[in-house]
Amino acid sequence: MVSMLNAGALRPTSAAARLLSALTILLVATGLSGCGAVNRVPTLEEQAKSSWSEVQNQYQRRADLIPNLVETVKGYAQQEKDVLIGVTEARAKASSVKVDASTVSDPQKFKEFQDAQNQLSGALGRLLVTVEKYPDLKSNQNFLALQSQLEGTENRIAVARRDYIGAVQAYNTELRTIPGRWIAAILYPEAKPMETFSATPNADRPPNVKF
């Protein structure tokens, strides 16, 4: 009987402790709101999403250049059929894998996106190496213009990826450290860590597309 009474007496105490803990965290979060800490999670999240949009824009810019590039090369090197088909198919696959701001926290989708873009980069590299065998193509004005645009786009992709990685690092760190972790748990329970690019060979610099 005494044991049952003791157990009953402990339950309110435990519930009260949990309530006190929750109120303490809420008070801390409220106190931090005056210095802007309570808004850091959504602010960093929006910055990361904006950076991701720029990554997508630059990859799309590259995809838009490829059809004209392939047609120009085809005019001088139709015998390079396998290489041209490889680029076209890689572009189609890369364009079909979509990762928007709402799915950028999905590891599988993000990996599919990165793998598809890496495959396209490899196919483009093989195409540009092939061009070395065709001096007339290398001096073609249309090809030179496309080469310049592609080089600029690869540079912008590298910058956009770097900015995105930095934005995601700041956002994910906020979610995993105190007080951001507490604030997110109470006020932004839907906030999830975002995926970022894994290291690939020579990922620290854009591909060289000069001839």
Image (cartoon, helix red, strand yellow):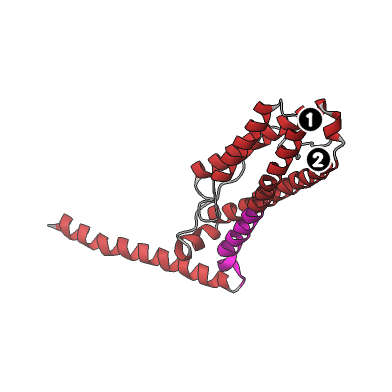
| SS at badge 2 | helix
Q: Give above or below for 182 relative to 197.
A: below
Q: Are marks 2 and 1 in contact (CB under 8 Å)?
A: yes
Q: Measuring 55% from the left and 60% from the top, which residue is drawn there?
A: 180
Q: Residues within 10 Å of mark 2 (few under 14, many from 20)?
A: some
Q: Which residue is mark 1?
A: 131
Which of 48 and 69 lies nearest the eye of the viewer? 69
Q: In the image, residue 59 lies at what x, y percent? A: 66, 47
Q: Give above or below for 116 relative to 24.
A: above
Residue 46 within the segment the image draws in magenta: yes
Which of 40 and 198 lies nearest the eye of the viewer? 198
Q: Measuring 23% from the left and 62% from the top, which residue is drawn there?
A: 9
From which residue to which does the magenta span run?
Answer: 35-54
Which of 10 and 37 lies nearest the eye of the viewer? 37
Give the residue type that dot 1 points to.
Answer: Val
| SS at badge 1 | helix
Instruction: Report the residue that reaches farthest toward the left.
Output: 1
Q: In the image, residue 57 lies at what x, y percent? A: 66, 53
Residue 6 within the segment the image draws in magenta: no
Q: Give above or below for 66 relative to 193.
A: above
Q: Which mark is residue 143?
A: 2
Q: In the image, residue 15 lies at what x, y percent? A: 31, 63
